Amino acid sequence: DKFTPESVHDNFVMMYGADDTGDITNNKNIKYYAREVDSGTNGRGLALLLADGGVASTDTEWNKQEVSMYQLLLCQCITALTVLRKGGSFTCKIFDVFTPFTVGLVYIMYLFFERISIIKPFTCRPASSERYLSCLNLRVRRPEKMLKYLRQVNKRLTRKENVTEIVSVE
């Protein structure tokens, strides 16, 4: 009863992508998901996207969590920029924000949303580096030039290239 009349709340659908793996790091799966979202929202896009992805356990190498999350975080952001409607919002789990790669990705999200915040909820263990990136009010729907660039970065990561930054510090 708390949904607005515009909210689609009665048609939840599980999707596993074009290759049926559910792997969001596959650009084809992101495009497949975008087509499904467009179809299900009459081309409007989503008002809200939440992403709480994680990689294989890093319990023994907690200091490498940020680096191990590069591709997943990148692809969650690509998905948000692809499927959100103008004015839509996005929240995803991140870890530390020390490396130029993560800082650059947060900067890109800052460029496309009216407001961003990095939040550490009280429910997170104090010793954990887990936090959430919250991005409010997408400025422009599907910024194609940026999406093309980010998909190229994803292809490089898929090929196991060493990508240490996505925005030049200069």
Image (cartoon, grey):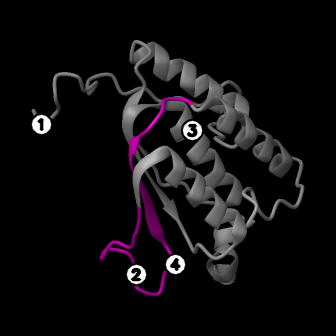
Residue type indicated by callout 1: Lys
Specify start and end residues of the magenta stretch as a single range.
117-142
**Residue 147 or 124: which is nearer the viewer?**
147
Amino acid, disc 3:
Thr
The three-letter code of the residue at mark 2 reads Arg
As measured in the structure, the alpha-carbon distance from the residue carrying label 4 to the one carrying label 3 is: 23 Å
- Estimate the x, y position of residue 167 in percent, counting from the top left: 72, 57
The answer to if 94 sits in the magenta stretch is: no
State the residue in front, 148 or 90.
148
Q: Which residue is mark 4?
A: 129
- Of discs 1 and 2, which sits in the foreground? 1
| Residue found at x 40% / y 85% | 126
- What separation in Å lies between label 1 and label 2 (alpha carbons)? 30 Å
Q: Which residue is mark 3?
A: 79
Which badge, 2 or 3, comes first in the chain's sequence?
3
Amino acid identity at mark 4: Ser
Residue most extreme to the left? 1
Q: Contact, CB < 8 Å: mark 1 with mark 3?
A: no
Give the residue at the far front of this rendering.
170
Quadrant that contains the C terminus: bottom right
Q: Residues within 10 Å of mark 2 (few under 14, many from 20)?
A: few
Q: Which residue is mark 2?
A: 125
Question: Helix, strand, or loop for circle 3?
Answer: helix
Q: Which mark is residue 2?
A: 1
Mark closest to the chain's N terminus, 1 or 3: 1
Q: Quadrant of residue 81?
A: top right
> Which element carries disc 1, helix, strand or loop?
loop
Instruction: Specify which label sits upstream in the sequence, 1 or 4.
Output: 1
Could you give the CA–CA distance between mark 2 and mark 3, rounded to whole angstroms?
Answer: 28 Å
